[in-house]
């Protein structure tokens, strides 16, 4: 029944239905984080819970390959009008941190479930230890707010008031939570009506057949992209700055193998699960959508006409050892998993960049700092908790153009909230909001500029959470001669005698008159910067993107009164020697890896993998403490021996050197 034309007609209907759902939610949501920042998703799913349509214009872009099947199976006896929900990362592995509340609704035709409408909203707060529920400092899931395993929230069209009362009692701003949840229920009702309309158009059997064909078509498109790449194996690693509060780097490692129209992403060698909230709760699912977000971006970059649905995941298999940062076991904290996922995307981009270097960009900023404020509004004497704005960094330089300024590609779905709206709803005053000069990585194509934002508080004991703070040490990398992007930063009262640099700290208490300034990272550059046309460099200087000093230092362009000095530029560029390596990481990572070489990390994982899961993060931290003056595999072994001597309780089930072999 479904030839290519008819299949495209169905795909258009399905996407339009998803767009309608998104508009319903967008227009009726209560919190700024949903209605302005748009941290939400909606989707249509087949009878098994596999996503077959998502919107393209509104909402987050993480979940086109999400499957609800495990969560759906945990609820019994679905009836028309029912809506189930969960926000528990360890039940059904649909939600991935407590603020993300997922809802799904069965769509019945002739007494039979033919599809599901689903989606999530990011609640401003779910209770727990800190306002907005998220901080890297949290160490177990129980600190991250109230959790609901999969259960019915709406029974045959009627909300379960007991569940709503429990939620209201445990969260800081229940009106926002419940308002957003009811808006999402409205969106699911829209999806239900649109699915039933499609069934009337195509017939029940035709609709079910067509949905399966949409998934098959996306799979075929993904396999076509893989076949356009060479067979081979590529390795790449990248780091989050800290694995816990003011501690050691968190390393993610990928071994990508492409063979024909299939790919294996082996994350063995990534750090053990952490004693902080940076863990990613994949549940060991080899095609969990959180593991494959970077893959979606690669596929869509190489084929912008690709269908976004769960079929894309079929050619890929992810390997995530249990007890690792990408497959933690309960009760590991997971609230800040989005920071690790940003680095996970960088790792995937780096591996694919080696496979098809001529087709992919440099690294995007890879940090999307989301700022929440809990303060008192002196105008009304009421407590306020609100998202202020996402601070998203620059995009990586593309093969054909500069990186996007202030919108870091893989996090570009997070929309800016207009300052006027923020200042109306939240008692803060913005003193700066714009692009950071000299922050984009130098290159033939320049990396996108970072975003910088500063605002003043007016009430005492105002509490700030700025989650996903990262890239203040390890830069977004450049490729093919391009340079790494600029680092991120955060400070209180910058430029005054009371200045405090906060680095990656993600919580702070501010007093009246204090100013918080946040800068994201810039995108990596692509290609030799000394090959960039001098007129482009001069234009960047005129626009304020680049300083005159950086023009000479990084691009070899000499300016006189804003104009290019052709002779001096030619002389300066003649002395330049282009870089030979594929990646440029910056001096910070180069210095770090002089001690922590691949061999050192191999030995580290040999000793850690031989330990029970609950000992591994402790042992890692103690080894790092004893690495001063040591390096390479022998240094790691000596440090581990010292740890064992200090802590005789540390189990050693088999000789460590034997485990390494």
Image (tube, helix red, strand yellow):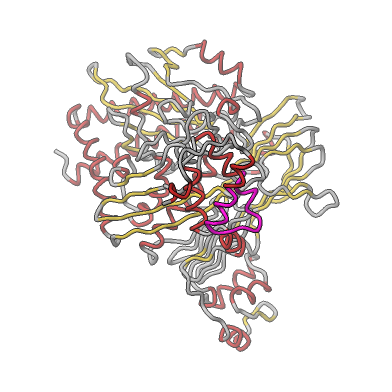
Residue 331 percent across, percent down from the top left: 52, 28
Residue drawn at (47%, 29%), measured in percent from left and top? 89
Q: Main secondary structure of the magenta part?
A: helix
Read off the magenta span. Answer: 622-640
Eyeballing the image, is 140 above or below 438?
above
**Where 287 sits versus 489, above or below?**
above
Q: In x, y percent, where is residue 490?
A: 69, 49
Q: Which x, y percent locates residue 445?
A: 50, 68
Q: Is residue 418 left or right of residue 28?
A: right
Q: Residue at x 80, y 55 (%)?
A: 495
Instruction: Return the x and y of residue 51 as percentages of the image width and height.
Output: 33, 35
Name which quarter of the figure residue 246 lies in: top right
Would you say 303 lies left or right of 253 here?
left
Q: Quadrant of residue 507?
A: top right
Quadrant, the N terminus: top left
- Is residue 516 magenta-colored? no
Q: Residue at x 42, y 16 (%)?
A: 152
Is 27 drawn above or below residue 361 in the view shown? above
- Looking at the picture, tell me which residue is in the foreground, 50 or 195: 50
Is residue 633 shown in magenta?
A: yes
- Left or right: where 405 falls relative to 463: left
Q: Taking 180 as reference, is 584 above or below it? A: below
Q: Quadrant of residue 486?
A: bottom right
Q: Is residue 417 visible?
A: no
């Amino acid at each position: 029944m479904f030839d290519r034309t008819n299949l495209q007609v169905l795909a258009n209907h399905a996407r339009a239905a998803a767009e309608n759902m998104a508009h319903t939610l967008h227009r009726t949501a209560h919190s700024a984080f949903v209605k302005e920042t748009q941290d939400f998703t909606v989707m249509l799913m087949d009878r098994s819970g596999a996503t077959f349509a998502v919107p393209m214009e509104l909402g987050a872009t993480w979940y086109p390959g999400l499957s609800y099947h495990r969560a759906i199976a945990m609820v019994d006896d679905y009836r028309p009008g029912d809506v189930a929900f969960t926000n528990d990362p360890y039940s059904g592995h649909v939600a991935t941190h407590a603020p993300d509340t997922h809802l799904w609704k069965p769509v019945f035709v002739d007494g039979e479930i033919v599809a599901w409408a689903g989606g999530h909203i990011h609640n401003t707060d779910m209770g727990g230890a800190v306002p907005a529920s998220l901080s890297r400092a949290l160490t177990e899931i129980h600190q991250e707010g109230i959790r609901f395993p999969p259960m019915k929230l709406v029974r045959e069209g009627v909300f379960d008031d007991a569940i709503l009362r429990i939620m209201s009692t445990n969260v800081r701003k229940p009106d926002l939570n419940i308002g957003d949840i009811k808006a999402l229920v409205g969106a699911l009702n829209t999806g239900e009506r649109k699915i039933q309309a499609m069934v009337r158009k195509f017939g029940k059997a035709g609709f079910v057949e067509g949905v399966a064909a949409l998934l098959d078509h996306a799979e075929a498109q993904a396999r076509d992209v893989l076949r356009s790449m060479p067979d081979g194996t590529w390795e790449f690693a990248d780091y989050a700055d800290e694995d816990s509060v003011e501690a050691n780097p968190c390393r993610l490692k990928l071994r990508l193998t492409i063979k024909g129209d299939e790919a294996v992403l082996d994350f063995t060698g990534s750090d053990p699960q952490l004693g902080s909230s940076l863990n990613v709760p994949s549940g060991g699912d080899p095609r969990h959508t959180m593991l494959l977000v970077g893959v979606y971006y690669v596929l869509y970059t190489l084929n912008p006409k690709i269908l976004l649905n769960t079929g894309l995941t079929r050619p890929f298999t992810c390997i995530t050892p249990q007890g690792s940062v990408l497959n933690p076991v309960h009760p590991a904290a997971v609230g800040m998993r989005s920071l690790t996922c940003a680095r996970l995307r960088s790792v995937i981009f780096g591996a694919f960049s080696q496979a098809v270097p001529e087709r992919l960009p440099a690294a995007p900023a890879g940090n999307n700092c989301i700022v929440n404020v809990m303060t008192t509004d002196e105008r009304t004497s009421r407590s306020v908790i609100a998202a202020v704005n996402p601070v998203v960094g620059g995009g990586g330089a593309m093969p054909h153009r500069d990186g996007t300024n202030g919108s870091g590609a893989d996090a570009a779905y997070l929309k800016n909230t207009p300052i006027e709206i923020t200042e109306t709803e939240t008692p803060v005053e913005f003193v700066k909001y714009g692009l950071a000069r000299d922050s984009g990585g130098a290159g033939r194509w320049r990396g996108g500029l970072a975003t910088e934002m500063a605002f003043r508080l007016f009430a005492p004991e105002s509490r700030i959470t700025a989650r996903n703070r990262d890239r203040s040490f390890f830069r977004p990398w450049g490729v093919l001669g391009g340079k790494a992007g600029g680092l991120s930063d955060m400070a209180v009262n910058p430029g005054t005698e009371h200045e405090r640099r906060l680095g990656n700290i993600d919580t702070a208490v501010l007093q009246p008159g204090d100013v918080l300034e946040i800068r994201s990272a810039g995108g990596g550059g692509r290609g030799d910067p000394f090959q960039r046309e001098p007129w482009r460099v001069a234009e960047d200087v005129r626009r304020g993107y680049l300083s005159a000093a950086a023009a000479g230092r990084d691009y070899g362009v000499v300016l006189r009164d804003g104009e290019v000095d052709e002779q001096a530029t030619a002389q300066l560029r003649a002395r330049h020697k282009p870089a030979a390596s594929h990646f440029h990481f910056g001096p910070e990572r180069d210095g770090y890896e002089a001690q922590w070489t691949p061999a050192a990390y191999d030995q580290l994982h040999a000793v850690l993998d031989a330990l029970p899961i609950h000992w591994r993060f402790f042992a890692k931290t103690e080894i790092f403490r004893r690495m001063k003056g040591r390096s390479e595999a022998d240094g790691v072994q000596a440090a581990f021996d010292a740890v064992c001597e200090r802590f005789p309780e540390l189990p050693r089930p088999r000789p460590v050197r034997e485990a390494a072999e």
